[in-house]
Amino acid sequence: MNYKLINQVIGLIEKFDTTEDSKSYTKDLIGFKRWIYDDQRETDHLYNELNWEGKENGRSPESEISTLIVHLNRYAKTYSKSAIYDSEFSTQEEFIYLINLKAFGSMTKTELIKRNLQEKPVGMQTINRLVGQGWIQQNDSIVDKRSKIISITAKGLTALEDIMKKIRQASQIVTGNLSTTEKMQLIKLLQKLDHFHQAIYEKSIAPAELVNIAFNEFLLQKN
């Protein structure tokens, strides 16, 4: 029995039952088949309409998406560097750490580092720099004496406020010429991607096994 095919069909049925674009179809086999047909036709239309470098030579949509995400990350970093230029901040990570502490409150060092998806040695360097600046403080955890609870200080709040105007401007530049509707659509897609990758990240898989496990145990199961 082809269990992969069965899982794919079940996934399609769940999508048909829950997505907004399926509400105009009857909730029976005929409606389901029409929805699949129309969905595939729309996918084919978009594929033919869109162009990217190397497409004519077989370069995949996945490759183009990965490249664009890398490019956008680099663009965002250049704007962030400009925003903190001539300020007391040394790196983008420093103000991101402060923003997280302001938004989500005190947390352990490990929680703060994980929230920023950094490796522990790099995260600890950032925390130490912030402590040295007097922008954050650390206290013993009441729950676990071995852990330190990190919180933002009044000085840290002031430093963050002084730079936030430029940070907001940098964020607006990153989203570029997208309309409000396009921004909402992009948030929806990026959140879906983030949830997928977060589940893998939380497993702390060794680099030697990461691609194999992520592909076979997460990607193939989802498809």
Image (spheres, rainbow, N blue to C red):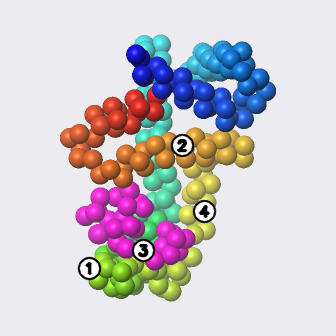
**Which of marks 1 and 3 precedes in the sequence?**
3
Of callouts 2 and 3, which one flags the residue occurring earlier in the amino acid sequence?
3
Q: Nearer the viewer, residue 51 or 81?
A: 51
Mark 2 or mark 1, whichever is nearer to me: 1
Magenta stretch: includes residue 139: no
Secondary structure beneath dot 1 equals loop
Residue type at mark 3 is Met
For the residue carrying disc 3, how many other residues have a C-alpha within 10 Å: few (<14), some (14-19), or many (20+)? some
Q: 58 or 106, which lies in front?
A: 106
Work out which quarter of the rendered image holds the N terminus and state it: top left
Residue positioned 34% across, 68% down in the render = 110
Q: Is residue 182 above or below residue 171?
A: above
Alpha carbons under labels 1 and 4: distance apart? 37 Å
- State the separation of the CA atoms marked 2 and 3: 26 Å
> Main structural element of the magenta stretch: helix, strand or loop?
helix
Q: Is disc 3 in contact with disc 1, using a CB cutoff of under 8 Å? A: no
> In which quarter of the view is residue 43 placed?
top right
Of labels 3 and 4, earlier in sequence is 3
Q: Which residues are magenta?
A: 99-125
Q: Which residue is mark 4?
A: 168
| Spot occupied by residue 96 in the image (x, y as percentages of width and height) | 46, 65
For mark 3, what is the residue? 107
Disc 1 target residue: 146
